[in-house]
Amino acid sequence: MFVGNLPVDASEKSVTELFSTFGKVRSIQIASDIFTGKCRGFGFIEMEGHEARAAIAGLDGKNYNGKFLRVAFEEPKKKFKGRR
């Protein structure tokens, strides 16, 4: 799942805790700034299908530390080598 509009102080631990109320978080990747290490405002979370749907229904549009989350099904883009 794609999680957008995360606050700058969001960490993998805090976001995992938020999503774990809906089920087991299998993996999490929060995009962080190279220089500051702070959250860039988005990430990807992997959960079971029915748990992911529950998390989307429960968290999409919810206020989290002053920001309204955007939660939706989306896969991270694959990196391509060479031409397509």
Image: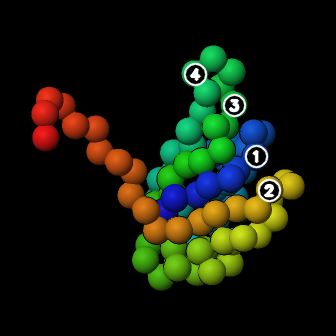
Q: Kindly tell me whether residue 24 is visible in this rendering.
A: no
SS category of the residue bearing label 2: strand
In the image, 1: left or right of 83? Answer: right
Residue at 58%, 81% (x, y): give it.
54
Q: Earlier in the sequence, mark 1 or mark 3?
A: 1
Quadrant position of the C terminus in the picture: top left
**Residue position for label 3:** 38
Question: Pointer 1 and pointer 2: residues touching (CB < 8 Å)?
Answer: yes
Residue at 58%, 21% (x, y): give it.
34
Percent across and percent down for residue 32 are 60, 33
Mark 2 to mark 4 CA distance (whole Å): 22 Å
Q: Amino acid at mark 2?
A: Lys
Dot 2 alpha-carbon crowd within 10 angstroms: few under 14, some 14 to 19, many 20 or more? some
Task: Indicate whether 38 appears above or below 8.
Answer: above
Dot 4 alpha-carbon crowd within 10 angstroms: few under 14, some 14 to 19, many 20 or more? few
**Residue position for label 2:** 67
Mark 1 to mark 3 CA distance (whole Å): 9 Å
Residue at the outermost left position: 83
SS category of the residue bearing label 1: loop
Q: Earlier in the sequence, mark 3 or mark 2?
A: 3
Residue at the outermost right position: 66
